Amino acid sequence: MSRPDGRSPAEPRPVEIVPHFHRNAEGSVLYRAGGTVVLCTASIDAVVPAWMAGKGKGWLTAEYQMHPRASRARREAREGRGKSPSGRTQEIQRLIGRALRSAIDLDAIGERTIVIDCDVLEADGGTRTASITGGFVAMSLALAKLRTANQIAPVLRDQVAAISVGHLGGDAILDLVYEEDSKARVDLNVVATARGSIVEVQATAEGEAIERRDLDSMIDVGLAGVAKLVSMQRSALASAGVELASLFQAGRFS
């Protein structure tokens, strides 16, 4: 089938990952996937939520929306909205948090909180998957700073990325733009590791149900897309002077 931007069905959008885009955060990237642009920052605080205090463990959480790190000194709370985050926003925040927590041994970072802020500057589909993929790079940059300062040992156990797949026109279509997303019979997001292990799959039929074999095909296409993204993540980190393997626990990197 013909796609709006001329790509083949299994071809991801052009991706650009710009490390250290935001000067104030411990780790940051500007992540572009076609027309979707997300600023991802990783802020590290030397405290944990009250319910975790005294346990010697760390925590990671995520926020998704407008950017809160305008202050050079610290991350500020979001304000001026006059309403609670929507259900969609909360669901995406939880997804990003789950995805990135799967990649890190939080018992090994001490009583620190890592906050991943994903601020969508331009949206053309795939904002949650872009947030996860860019968020991993931002997190790794922040961890590299702690590692360089000898404040932590290697703490990563997996490399994580995410991408969308749609069932459209009878085909499994990788990395949907909004025009495709709005027409897809099924929209699926796959979060996976560099080894091809699945962290999470979100999939819903917007109309007629599909066969199991079609769902399996979509997941296969998504995993192939993730494999391309993890290579891009490593290249972006290397360009910033970070060797990803140095952040991994023994025997974990592949």
Image (tube, rainbow, N blue to C red):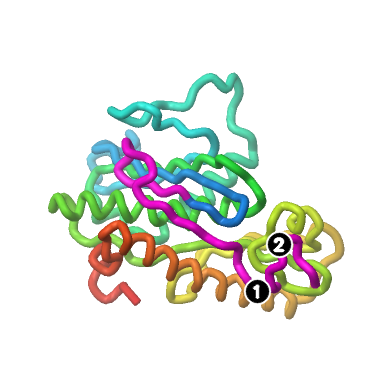
Secondary element type, mark 1: loop
Was residue 29 drawn as part of the magenta stretch in this picture? yes
Report the residue marked by disc 1: 10
Report the residue marked by disc 2: 5
Tell me if 63 is positioned left or right of 157 in this view. Answer: right
Q: In this rendered view, identify the residue nearer to me: 50 or 96.
A: 96
Part of the protein shown in magenta: 1-30
Q: What amino acid does circle 2 point to?
A: Asp
Which dot marks residue 29?
none
Q: Is residue 178 above or below residue 168?
A: above
Q: Mark 1 to mark 2: distance in Å? A: 13 Å
Q: Residue at x 34, y 60 (%)?
A: 237
Q: What amino acid does circle 1 point to?
A: Ala
Label the magenta part by its dominant secondary structure: loop
Tell me if 128 is positioned left or right of 45 in this view. Answer: right
Q: Is residue 129 above or below residue 235?
A: above
Q: Quadrant of the N terminus?
A: bottom right
For the residues labelled 1 and 2, say whether their Cβ atoms are less than 8 Å apart.
no
Q: Residue at x 31, y 73 (%)?
A: 253
Q: In this rendered view, identify the residue nearer to me: 62 or 242.
A: 242
Return the residue found at the far front.
Answer: 6
Q: Position of residue 66 (x, y in %)?
A: 52, 33
Secondary element type, mark 2: loop
